[in-house]
Amino acid sequence: MSAALPYRPFDADNHYYEATDAFTRHLDPSLGSRVIQWCEIEGRTYPVIAGKVFRGVANATFDPVAEPGCLSQYFRGNPNGDNPLDLLRARNPIRAEYRDRDARLAVMDDQGLDRVWMFPTLGMIYEEPLRHDPEAVTLLFGAFNRWLDEDWGFAYRDRIFASPYITLVDCGWACRELEWAIDRGARTIVMRPAAPTTASGQVSPADARFDPFWARVNEAGITVVVHAGDSGYTSHGYARDGCCSWSGRWRTSSRR
């Protein structure tokens, strides 16, 4: 691909698989039962969020993990009538490039990529289970962002641009976290496409109370990426709970 172009591509939607301590390394252990911790049930490891076992991801350790590209044909019309769950069952040990930035750079070179924006995987679905406790949300993502800075960096070698996760559940926290991220070299930040649930209830991100945050975003010129994640649609009645949701099981219609 790179040989046919006068430049190398910039991939604006790369992801990593979070390390098992991504949300706990910088979290006070005494807060684990309120925020997040791990448990083992019948030989499988699960995150426990707000004191409840979270089963939204079959294997949150990502080791082993589904083969890359296994859903390619499914998303191109599913010509073979496959059940996506069957396609996801073929798994391999996790690869170094999924968690190590230098290994990822080597793969980027092999693939002809110049630069990438990097986004969370689990991180995009963990705000919703904690929405009832806005402070816990800030504790979770404050810890997560510091792990991200350590393991990936926000502008590693000016090629990997990992996005810290910012939530608006607390505008003061969001402004402080934004300043911290900017000071650490962040070029982008990421948030989920949903109205944040603040201490006073759910509020539009365009509400005037968030003007200080958006003013600083505009002044800094940092890019805000609103990335797909768990936006809580089942909680708001847009779909049946447990159907096609992160919090339930992925159900598919029978083959025709």
Image (cartoon, rainbow, N blue to C red):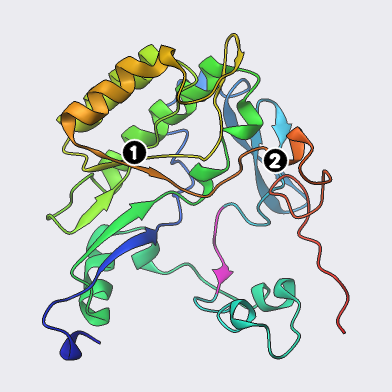
Q: Earlier in the sequence, mark 1 or mark 2?
A: 1
Q: Does residue 96 appear to the left or right of 111 in the view shown?
A: right
The disc label shown at residue 164, or none:
1
Point 23% across, 45% down: residue: 153
Above or below, 145 against 205 in this view is below
Q: Is mark 1 on a helix, strand or loop?
A: loop
Relative to residue 172, is residue 15 depicted above or below? Answer: below
The reply to whether dot 1 and dot 2 touch (C-beta < 8 Å) is no
**What is the three-letter code of the residue carrying label 1?**
Pro
Q: Which residue is drawn at 54% across and 62% down?
A: 63
Most frequent secondary structure within the magenta stretch: loop
**Numbered label attached to residue 46:** none
Foreground mark, 1 or 2, reads 2
Residue projecting furthest to the top:
200
Q: Where is residue 172 in the image (x, y as percent from the top left)?
A: 37, 12
Could you tell me which residue is drawn at 23 percent across and 44 percent down? 154
Inspect the image, locate mark 2, and give the three-letter code of the amino acid beneath it.
Tyr
Compared to 222, does 210 lie above or below?
above
Name the quadrant of the C terminus: bottom right
The magenta-colored residue range is 61-66
Q: Quadrant of residue 107?
A: bottom left
| Residue at disc 2, secondary structure | loop
**Spatial CA span between label 1 and label 2:** 23 Å
The residue to which callout 2 is attached is 233
Nearest the viewer among 177 and 156 is: 177
Residue 168 at what x, y percent from top left? Answer: 45, 23
Q: Is disc 2 surrounded by few (<14), some (14 to 19) or many (20+) residues within 10 Å? A: some
Residue 102 falls inside the magenta stretch: no
Q: Position of residue 223 (x, y in %)?
A: 27, 42
Please tell me in which quadrant of the rendered image residue 236 appears.
Answer: top right
Residue 62 among those drawn in magenta: yes
Q: Where does residue 209 sit, x and y in percent of width and height? A: 42, 12
